[in-house]
Amino acid sequence: MGIITNFSDLDLTKTYGYADYLLWQFQERVELINGFIFKMSPAPSMVHQRISNNVSYELNTYFKRKPCDVFVAPFDVRLPIPSAKNDATVVQPDLCIICDESKLDARGCNGTPDLMVEIISSNNSKHDVHTKFNLYQEAGVKEYWIIEPNDKIILVYTLVNCEFIGLKPQVEGENIKSLLFPELNIAVEDVFYKV
């Protein structure tokens, strides 16, 4: 396969790997999940961007002098999925935290981040709530946050015995509870500031 410059030239019924993904030079943003292409929204909404910026600011402040790194989309994460062929899953979470520097390379993260954050939008809710939930659980992501802008709710899932266990939904007036980073203290209001 040579360089692909038009999304329409891809066969969406075929499975692909990371080597194929690197040859795609078209405008559309995509993720590769278990070898299959998932088209992403062309550009996040203003609300999505504000939430991403707010969470990024809080996480960067907390991790500033700690051995973990904060990354914001677009940032490729090549997830090791036991049930899929090697290098068949590349996602771009809204935010992720990586505490093992050996997983980082010039192209992004090659391995499982410690924390993944997805901000729900109307056109991707099923993908983030169902597909990515199962994917991140199988990959061994230690903690997964789902941020729901419409209801201003944050759902936190922690991996226990290879399964995500959900905490009580976090709402305005509360602080996000992270079992992975217990000293992390983010007010839910700060996540939804100016939204």
Image (tube, rainbow, N blue to C red):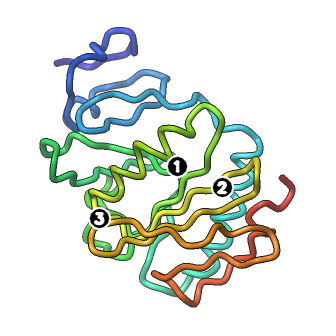
Q: Earlier in the sequence, mark 2 or mark 3?
A: 2
The residue to which callout 3 is attached is 140
SS assignment at label 3: loop
Query: Which residue: 39% across, 65% down?
Result: 164
Q: Which of 190 and 99 is in front in this view?
A: 190
On the image, which quarter does residue 172 sit in? bottom right
Query: Which residue: 67% across, 73% down?
Result: 58
On the image, which quarter does residue 185 sit in? bottom right
Q: Residue furthest left?
A: 85
Q: How far apart are marks 2 and 3 (CA)?
A: 23 Å
Q: How crowded is mark 1: few (under 14 residues within 10 Å), some or many (20 or more)?
A: few
Q: How crowded is mark 3: few (under 14 residues within 10 Å), some or many (20 or more)?
A: many
SS assignment at label 2: helix
Amino acid type at mark 1: Ala
Q: On the picture, is 75 further left or further right than 20? A: right
Amino acid type at mark 3: Gly
Mark 2 and mark 1 in contact? Answer it, CB < 8 Å. yes
Q: Marks 2 and 3: which is nearer the front?
A: 3
Q: Marks 1 and 3: which is nearer the front?
A: 3
Q: How many labels does the image show?
A: 3
Vertical arrangement, residue 73 with respect to residue 140, above or below = above
Q: Position of residue 130 (x, y in %)?
A: 44, 44
Amino acid type at mark 2: Ser
The residue to which callout 1 is attached is 73
Q: Position of residue 24 (x, y in %)?
A: 33, 25
Q: Distance between the residues labelled 2 and 1?
A: 9 Å
Q: Which of marks 1 and 3 is nearer the N terminus?
A: 1
Q: On the picture, is 49 further left or further right than 31? A: right
Q: Residue furthest right?
A: 194
Q: On the picture, is 158 further left or further right than 173? A: left
The residue to which callout 2 is attached is 52
